[in-house]
Image (cartoon, rainbow, N blue to C red):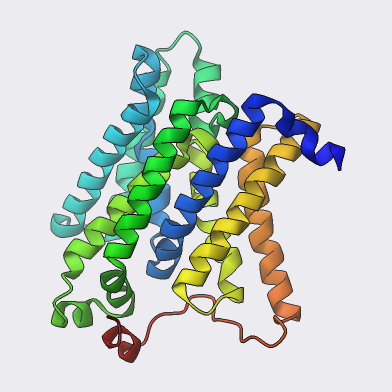
Amino acid sequence: MSWLLEPFTADFMLRALVGGVLVAAICAVVGTWVVLRGMAFLGEAMGHGMLPGVAVATLVGAPVLLGAALSATVMTIGVGLVRRRGRLSHDTSIGLLFVAMLALGVIVISHSGSFASDTTAILFGDVLAIRVPDLVVLALALLIVLVTAAAFHRSFVALAFDERVAKVMGLRPALAQGVLVGLVTVAVVASYQAVGSLLVVGLLLAPAVAAAPWTTSIESRMLLGALVGALAVGTGLVVSWHSGTAAGASIAATSIAFAAVSSLLRAVVRPTGAPVAQADPVPTEKAVRALP
C-alpha cells in the first residue's frame, strides 16, 4: 500500500487531493442538474468562455480565479441574451459564442513570452499548484453551491419535469434557469485550476453519469457522484505521480473511465436487493406537486 499513500506525503500533493475533493463535490451537485437538464453543451461553453479572463489575469499577474469568474460571467450574460433575443437556435448561438471566446483567449495568450507554458496551464489546469488560500475559496464555493441548490431544489425539480408546470406552481422557472446557469458558472470556475478549461466538462459530467445507474433519487446521485469524483481525483493523482503524466488530464481521464465502467457494470449486474434507477430520472408531476 505504500505506493498508494506515498504521493500524499508531499504537501503539494495533499493540497491537490483536498482541493480536488472539494471540486468533485461541487461538480457532483451541479453536474447532476446539468445531466438532468441536458446542459452539457452549456458547461463546455462556459469552460471555453472563461479563457480570455484567465489569459488576461495570467499576463497582468492578477488572481486567475478572478479573471475566470469575470470572463465566465460575461459568457453567462451573453448566453442569456442570445437565449431571449437571438434569431439563431440556442445551440448554434452558444457554439458561436464559445468559439469566439476561445479564439479571443488564444489571441491574448499569444502575446505572452511564455506562450507554451501559459497555454498548457490554462487549457489543462495545474492542480499541483493549489495553495491553502485556494482551498478556502473552494470550500466557500462548495458552501454557496450547497445552500443555493437546497434553496432552489423544488424549483429545479419542477423545471426538470416541465417548465410550464413550474410556472403554474409559481416556481419562477426563468429565475430557476438563471440560478442553475450561475451554478454551472461557479462549478466551471472552481474546477479550472484542477483540470483546466478544456477538461472541466469531464469532471462536471462523468461522476454524475457514473452514479446515475445506481441511484434512485437526485440527492443520492449527488452523494454518490461526489464519492466517485473524489475517487477519480485520488486515483488520477496517484497515476500522475507514478507515471509522470499531467495531473489534471489524469483526473479527467479517470473520471470518464469510471463512467464507462459504471455503464458496463450496469449492463451485467444490478445492486442486490435494490432497484436500479433510470439513467436520467425525470421527476413525475405527482412527485413535483408533493414537494414541500
Asked where in the image residue 133 lies, by quadrant, the reply is: top left
Q: Relative to 10, does residue 71 appear above or below in the rendering?
A: below
Q: Nearer the viewer, residue 60 or 231?
A: 231
- Residue that lies at the very extreme toward the top in this rendered image: 113
Residue 46 x/y as whole percent: 36, 45
| Count of residue discs | 0
Q: Which part of the image, by quadrant, shows the N terminus?
A: top right
Position of 160 relative to 11 (above/below) = below
**Residue at coordinates 73% horizontally, 29% vertically from top-left?**
9
- Tell whether 49 sits left or right of 263: left
Report the residue at 18% width, 65% height from top.
174
**Residue situated in front as seen by the camera: 201 or 6:** 6
Check the picture and name the quadrant holding the C terminus. bottom left
In the image, 26: left or right of 174? Answer: right
Is 242 left or right of 45, judged from the image as shown? right
Left-right relation of 91 to 16? left
Please state which of residues 109 and 25 is positioned toward the viewer in this rendering. Answer: 25
Can residue 47 be seen from the camera position used here? no
Could you say where residue 235 lies in the image, as x and y percent from the top left? 71, 46
Q: Residue at coordinates 40% horizontally, 64% vertically from top-left?
A: 33
Q: Residue 52, image x and y in percent?
A: 34, 29
Q: Quadrant of residue 87?
A: bottom left
Percent across and percent down for residue 267 are 71, 78
Q: Is residue 101 in sight in this rendering?
A: yes
